[in-house]
Amino acid sequence: MVLGIFGSASASAVEEDIASIIAKSEKAAYYAGGDGKSMARMIIVDSQGRKQMRQFTILRKDVLDNEGTETGDQKMLVFFSRPTEVKGTVFRVEKRTNINTDDDRWLYLPSLDLVKRIAAGDKRTSFVGSHFFYEDVSGRAVSEDNFTMQNTTDTHYVLRATPKNVGSVEFSHYIVEIDKQTYLPTLINFFKGDDNYRRVEAVSVETVQGYPMVVRSKVSDLASGGYTLMEFRGIQYDIALPDSVFSERSLRVPPREFVE
């Protein structure tokens, strides 16, 4: 099992190595810089090849404690600009690393002037009609899963993850491939038993301000054949976003200096 990968290392040393890998991977994927901004576009393709588009701006900021140390918690806002039917829609997240505390997620619907709270049980449902889930966008905390090393290659660590709370997700386990150089997860296959029904993959990676990041990603529904491509541009890190930006007020009155 795992020991064969790390030679004669003790079980505790193996666990430390796995913990280090997944911690670095989570930081690379979701915590580059202290805050950040990017513009994104999703192309949604259904099983019959019909396409839809979504365009939006993402603002993200890591939460610090009173001593200025990162807590692992995070705030995020997603402002939709196109097409017309979703313009003005805003997705707001307060992400928490404590496994006993659910993340808070809200969706502002401008046509109804309604702030809709997204239940914890809905985090693995479609994000605005795409094949991405709400949890894909804000990130799944690694503390929610147990990891074991399945394999290593010259370029990747291959880990198997099983959920600690099996009743909170639709999958039985997933296999994630983590790049040894960047620690970015480049391929994730989700399973229900032996059925590989969903895939998340990094299509293109670039370095921005010294941070490797996925600039093009794809989520595929392997059962239906539909998929969604997401592309990022205008990426900026460490732009000193004020805490006031991440308030409920920004749902109705977006901070134009950061969104436009």
Image (spheres, grey):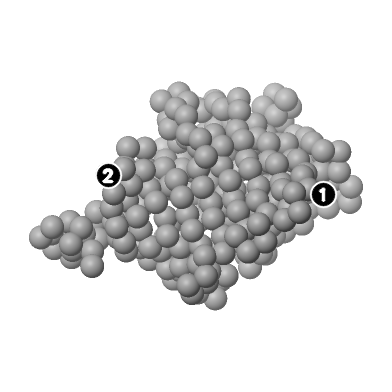
For label 1, the crowd category at 10 Å Cα-Cα, with few meaning under 14, some 14 to 19 and many 20 or more, is: some
- Say which quadrant the C terminus sits in: top right
What percent of the width, then of the height, locates residue 149?
30, 60
Tag shown at residue 155? none
What percent of the width, then of the height, locates residue 244?
64, 36
Q: Is residue 248 visible?
A: no
Q: Seen in the image, is 237 located left or right of residue 127?
A: left
Q: Quick check: 17 above or below 170?
A: above
Q: Residue at x 35, y 58 (%)?
A: 159
Q: Seen in the image, is 72 located left or right of residue 236?
A: left
Q: Disc 2 on helix, strand or loop?
A: loop
Q: Amino acid at mark 1?
A: Leu
Snapshot quadrant of residue 246: top right
Residue at mark 2 = 154
- Say which quadrant the N terminus sits in: bottom left
Residue at mark 1 = 109
Nearest to N terminus: mark 2 or mark 1: 1
**Residue at the farthest right position:** 111
Please name whichever residue, 99 or 64, is drawn nearer the observer in this view of the structure. Answer: 99
Q: Quick check: 61 above or below 47?
A: above
Please name whichever residue, 57 or 52, is drawn nearer the observer in this view of the structure. Answer: 52
What percent of the width, then of the height, locates residue 141?
47, 56
Q: Amino acid at mark 2?
A: Asp
Q: Disc 1 on helix, strand or loop?
A: strand
Q: Single out the mark in the foreground, 2 or 1.
A: 2
What is the CA distance from the residue labelled 2 to the residue labelled 1?
A: 47 Å
What percent of the width, then of the height, locates residue 11?
18, 65
Q: Quick check: 225 above or below 203?
A: below
Q: Is residue 48 visible?
A: yes
Q: Residue at x 24, y 56 (%)?
A: 16
Q: Residue at x 41, y 37 (%)?
A: 68
**Residue at the farthest left position:** 8
